[in-house]
Image (cartoon, rainbow, N blue to C red):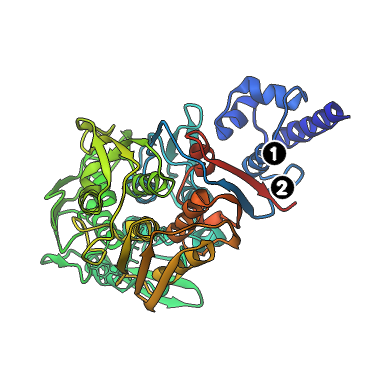
């Protein structure tokens, strides 16, 4: 009976694949598996998980095999287990989405290596596909190839996919060189309260872009012009700096951008622009001088760097579970303040010699974290633009502070909502007091207890809750984890590979 079931599913998959006009190899590539595995699945000779059926359904865009995909994904966590061994940091969500937007600058073929297979990237790929850009996973689903068409079809844009990301805003910079008027759906992303796009508009206006916003749509009109003096960003934001860089890259002349972010994703974008033939001076500083080139037609191959926020997440996983864990490929320059604060709190770590990331520029180390007796830091934890403590790393200090002795004040001055979500840790035994929407007082140490709850609607707080569940004895359930999958590739599976016990399941 069981075998018969597999044969029937296999036939459904074969029919859906043939309906799509794909070979077994093409489906294998989309799934990051081998042609022989697809062959076995189609003949009913391979046990197939609901997860795999869901992925096939997604790849083939087929309702027939989308069983298990339609419902949201949940996690069941058996906590109280120590982690051990080593785990690699993947490439960053924030650089990958910026580089995908940047590929729109290039007439030629862009290959991005080891791109994180995360929902945020999938949404941007859906948007790119809908406007005529050819994208495919190559080399067993590890790398991405992107080939834009001669003319983009913005009228067919996948608005649902676009609205689920904030990164779509970075289409503005490249598009202003390709068309005189266009429409884009409003930018979405995590629910972190109001996030302004005004600094983007102020910067891009200098290139002749005017945007009016009505009913969920940006209407863009372009009368190309040259910024006659340096562009001074009103905020040192990451995506606004990237948008200004994207506009400057194809602007025929030299553009100076002041108060630029020098954060990791901005640096990766600068290195990529250099690979496209655009000279950028001042990388790593707050003044960027861009020598634009009006036409970019290059076959380019670039490797985005590792994610400092994922590195911080894995470090926090080790700390809250009191484990010894080696986190490999940590982009150490973008973790320096975090590591200095943790050292003051008493965290015992060991670093390997530095080595270069595949982009040849970013410095990496392997970091071993050991179980330590932590004390609350004397000063509050608060973010600053790079080279300050990364805003996306702040939530992880809530989990770490919860296992330290004493009271830690966390001050997230940046986002309206993110600190509030951290109080979800109280449902797992945490003692966090919300002083106001931006400040949380965390008292440790914590005796975690298992619980069942919905994921907070913001990526980092959601992962923080997951980490606390990993520390809590017993079985916890975290419901609807799309928001985690937005920024982390197979996080549960990877944590399981170092000793966690996390099962994914869905409502059917
Ligand atoms: C795709 C991507 O790369 N997303 C990152 C990027 O989003 P992004 O660049 O879109 O960040 P925002 O523009 O939303 O800026 C974050 C918040 O910081 C405030 N702000 C920022 C800079 C500044 O000098 N003054 C100021 O007040 C903004 O008003 C906003 O409330 O940067 C954020 C802040 O590092 C990160 O959390 C996001 O993960
Ligand atoms: C806030 C974040 O991302 P985004 O800008 O994509 O919403 C994040 O990565 O934590």
Foreground residue among 17 and 377: 377
Q: Which percent across, then down, holds residue 195?
A: 37, 71
Give the Cα separation between the discs numbered 2 and 1.
7 Å
Closer to the N terminus: mark 2 or mark 1?
Answer: 1
Residue matched to label 1: 53
Q: Residue at x 32, y 45 (%)?
A: 372
Quadrant of residue 271 within the rendered picture: top left
Q: Residue at x 25, y 72 (%)?
A: 202
Quick check: can you spot residue 161? yes
Foreground residue among 175 and 186: 186
User: Which of the four quarters of the rendered structure image does ligand 2 lie in?
Assistant: bottom left
- Residues packed near mark 1 inside 10 Å, few (<14), some (14 to 19) or many (20 plus): some
Q: In the displayed structure, would residue 87 be above or below residue 467?
A: above
Q: Which percent across, then down, holds residue 297?
A: 30, 39
Q: Residue at x 25, y 36 (%)?
A: 350
Label 2 close to label 1 by CB (< 8 Å) = yes
Q: Which percent across, then down, holds residue 183?
A: 45, 66
SS for tag 2? Answer: loop
Residue matched to label 2: 68
Name of the residue lying farthest toward the top? 36
Foreground residue among 130 and 289: 289
Q: Residue at x 72, y 24 (%)?
A: 46
């Amino acid at each position: 009976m069981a075998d018969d079931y597999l044969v029937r599913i296999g036939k459904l998959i074969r029919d859906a694949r043939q309906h799509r006009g794909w070979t077994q190899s093409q489906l294998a590539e989309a799934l990051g598996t081998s042609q022989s595995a697809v062959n076995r699945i189609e003949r009913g000779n391979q046990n197939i998980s609901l997860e795999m059926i869901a992925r096939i359904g997604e790849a083939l865009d087929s309702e027939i095999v989308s069983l298990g995909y339609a419902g949201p994904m949940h996690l069941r966590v058996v906590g109280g287990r120590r982690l051990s061994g080593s785990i690699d940091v993947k490439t960053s969500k924030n650089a990958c989405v910026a580089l995908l937007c940047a590929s729109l600058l290039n007439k030629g073929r862009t290959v991005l290596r080891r791109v994180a297979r995360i929902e945020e990237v999938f949404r941007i790929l859906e948007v790119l596909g809908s406007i005529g850009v050819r994208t495919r996973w190559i080399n067993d689903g590890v790398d991405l190839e992107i080939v834009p068409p001669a003319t983009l079809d913005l009228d067919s844009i996948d608005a649902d996919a676009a609205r689920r990301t904030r990164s779509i805003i970075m289409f503005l910079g490249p598009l202003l060189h390709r068309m005189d008027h266009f429409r884009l759906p409003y930018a979405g992303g995590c629910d972190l309260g109001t996030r302004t796009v005004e600094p983007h508009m102020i910067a891009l206006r200098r290139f002749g872009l005017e945007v009016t916003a009505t009913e969920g749509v940006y209407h863009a009109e372009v009368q190309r012009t040259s910024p006659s003096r340096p562009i001074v960003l009103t905020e040192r934001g990451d995506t606004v700096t990237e948008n200004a860089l994207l506009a400057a890259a194809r602007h025929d002349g030299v553009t100076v951008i002041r108060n630029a972010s020098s954060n990791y994703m901005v640096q990766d974008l600068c290195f990529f622009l250099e690979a496209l033939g655009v000279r950028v001076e001042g990388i790593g500083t707050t003044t960027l001088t861009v020598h634009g080139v009006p036409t970019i037609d290059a076959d380019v191959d670039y490797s985005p760097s590792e994610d400092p926020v994922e590195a911080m997440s894995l470090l926090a996983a080790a700390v809250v579970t009191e484990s010894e864990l080696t986190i490999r490929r940590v982009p150490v320059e973008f973790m320096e303040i975090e590591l200095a604060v943790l050292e003051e709190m008493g965290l015992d770590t060991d670093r390997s010699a530095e080595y270069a990331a595949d982009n040849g520029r970013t410095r990496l180390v392997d970091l071993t974290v050991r179980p330590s007796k932590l004390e609350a830091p004397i000063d509050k934890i608060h973010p600053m633009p790079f080279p300050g403590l990364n805003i996306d790393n702040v939530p992880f200090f809530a989990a770490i502070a919860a296992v330290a002795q004493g009271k830690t004040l966390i001050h997230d001055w940046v986002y309206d909502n993110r600190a509030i979500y951290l109080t979800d840790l109280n449902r797992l035994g945490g003692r966090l007091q919300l002083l106001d929407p931006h400040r949380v007082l965390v008292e440790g140490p914590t005796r975690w207890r298992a619980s069942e709850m919905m994921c907070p609607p913001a990526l980092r707080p959601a992962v923080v809750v997951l980490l606390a569940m990993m520390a809590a004895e017993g079985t916890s359930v975290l419901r609807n984890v799309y928001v985690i999958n937005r920024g982390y590739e197979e996080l549960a599976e990877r944590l399981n590979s170092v000793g966690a016990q996390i099962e994914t399941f869905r409502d059917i």
